Amino acid sequence: MPDQNNSKTTIDEFARDVKYGLGRKRKRLDPKYFYDKAGSELFESICIQPEYYLTRTEYKIILKNIGELVNYFDNQNVSIIELGSGSSKKTKIILKYFLEKQEDKLHYFPIDVSYEMLFNSNKKLLNDFPNITSHPISSDYFDGIKQANEYIHANGNVPNKKLVLFFGSSLGNFEPKDALNFLRSIRKGLAPNDSFLIGFDLVKKKEVLEAAYNDDNGITAQFNLNILRRINSELDGDFDLESFKHFAYFNEYKSRIEMHLVSKIKQNVLIGKINKSFNFLKNETIHTENSYKYTLEDIENFAKKSKMKVEKNFLDDNKWFSLSLLVPN
Ligand code: TRP
């Protein structure tokens, strides 16, 4: 998931953020630093782990409900905007169905801060769908929607009804307050007849949740540890990766999976680039990421507070995940 505020982080910012995060009483690192090339690849690999039900479940929900979803738009033509670079199987089903039924050209606007991801995905996508008219926008999501709106309004032949896609329960990686602000900003880019299709991972048994973030192949662990590897290579750190371990658990009170890196021993770690060493107690953790889990009531509240309403929650049979169609209210 791309970070939305810091598209072009420099080494200096990385150094500053690490210094601040590790200097806190409760050590933290900003999850946006997970996603270098290795991190992005590990993340792709997480999505296909057997315990990681999210991607697969959301995909199945789309597959099962795509007919109904397309029917929501009657025979009106739409333009599709995706938050994220979009070459996923999920995007492809959506595009395939809208392409089939739409008389006008299908205009697709994938938005991603990472220029590289965006254009690589786009190339692949156009291979499979030579008939879509794609307008990749390398930008943060809000500005991206604005740019798509401008394009749509400046070109009379582009359908001006929009469907915005946001898959992966990525909203869950924001703090609740930020999640609401995010939805409010998205809402500002929607006209009364537009729709927003967004994935929410739902609260479920702790065992299922925790297994998803502790896959047996250890990919999530590698992904988490990758942030230390980056500090070593980019900031001249001397983290011994063997002496930290991945830890993820469901914090029921806050309704979130918390990811941490736990120091197995008492140790000092020197980070050359910031000229500072940090002490770790045995079992002290660095908190790296949260993934909030929601109830259907939470979704209602999010919608209400961002001046939208829930048109429909598409659920899987287990009720593990909701793909929610929100519309302006
Ligand atoms: N939003 C997804 C989730 O929370 C994907 C994700 C983001 C993720 N960061 C992660 C998955 C870290 C595993 C580990 O599950």
Image: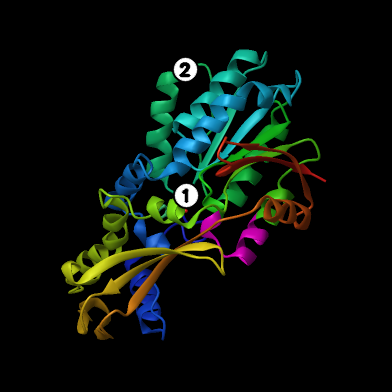
- Please give the name of the residue rendered at 74% of the width and 25% of the height, measured from the top-left corner: 73
Left or right? Give the position of 58 relative to 211: right
Q: Residues within 10 Å of mark 2 (few under 14, many from 20)?
A: few
Q: Nearer the viewer, residue 173 or 285?
A: 285
| Residue 221 picture location, percent across and down | 29, 58
Q: Residues within 10 Å of mark 1 (few under 14, many from 20)?
A: many
Q: Nearer the viewer, residue 313 or 131?
A: 313
| Residue 41 picture location, percent across and down | 30, 45
Question: Mark 1 and mark 2: span between their CA atoms?
Answer: 24 Å
Q: Nearer the viewer, residue 294 or 171?
A: 294
Left or right? Give the position of 38 relative to 89: left
- Please give the name of the residue rendered at 66% of the width and 61% of the height, measured from the top-left corner: 181
Q: Secondary structure at mark 1?
A: loop
Q: Which mark is residue 130?
A: 2
Res. 94 visible in picture? no
| Residue 18 picture location, percent across and down | 35, 74
The amino acid marked with disc number 2 is Pro
Q: Quadrant of residue 326?
A: top right
User: If you read the primary sequence from the N terminus, does the residue marked by circle 1 or circle 2 appear first?
Assistant: 1
Q: Secondary structure at mark 2?
A: loop
- Please give the name of the residue rendered at 51% of the width and 53% of the height, measured from the top-left corner: 205
Image: magenta residue range:
172-182
Q: Is mark 2 within 8 Å of ligand 1?
A: no
| Residue 30 picture location, percent across and down | 42, 67
Q: Which mark is residue 113?
A: 1
Res. 86 visible in picture? yes
